[in-house]
Amino acid sequence: MESIIIRVEIFKENGQYVAVSPELNVSSFGNTPEEAKASLSEAVSLFLEECERMKTLSEILEEAGFVHFAEPVPRWVAPEPLAIEELKIEHVAT
């Protein structure tokens, strides 16, 4: 069995917490950050099971930027962002 290590981002939206795996484009929600993370874990597990069933798991992970390590234990690791920044966009409403 291989581990797949994903990055999780959690946001608060309309009174709910939303957990997102940006590389896999999978999200879920909960009433607390912990519930949102647990719900995301279940959603990602189902997504990965379906990829495995379709025999596309390695391809999907590679396309998402994951790196496979065989040693010391087999695992896939999500790419680390080079930077996390804010960008202000001036928008003129019409």
Image (cartoon, grey):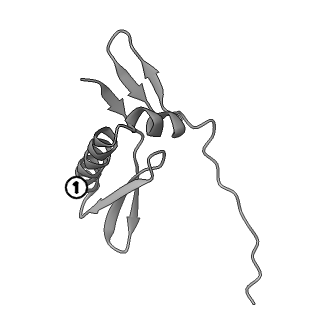
Q: Measured from the top left, where is residue 46 in percent x and y?
A: 25, 48
Q: Please say whether residue 19 is visible from this viewpoint.
A: no
Q: Measured from the top left, where is residue 86 in percent x and y?
A: 65, 54
In the displayed structure, 27 sits above or below 90; it is above
Residue 19 falls left or right of residue 94:
left
In the displayed structure, 37 sits above or below 5; it is below
Q: Measured from the top left, where is residue 38 in percent x and y?
A: 23, 49
Q: Which of the 4 image quarters holds residue 55?
A: top left
- The three-letter amino acid code for the residue at tag 1 is Glu
In the displayed structure, 69 sits above or below 40; it is above
Question: Residue at 37% across / 32% down in the picture?
Answer: 5
Q: How many marks?
A: 1
Question: Residue at 25% across / 59% down in the picture?
Answer: 32
Outermost residue, top direction?
72
In this view, the residue in front, 6 or 56, is 56
Question: Residue at 26% across / 42% down in the picture?
Answer: 49
In this view, the residue in front, 60 or 89, is 60
**Which part of the image, by quadrant, shows the C terminus?**
bottom right
Q: Are there few (<14), some (14-19), or many (20+) residues within 10 Å of tag 1?
A: some
Outermost residue, front direction?
54
Secondary structure of the residue carrying numbered label 1: helix
Q: Measured from the top left, where is residue 26 in percent x and y?
A: 39, 53
Residue hosting label 1: 35
**Which part of the image, by quadrant, shows the N terminus?**
top left
Residue 73 falls left or right of residue 81:
left
In this view, the residue in front, 35 or 42, is 42
In this view, the residue in front, 65 or 19, is 65
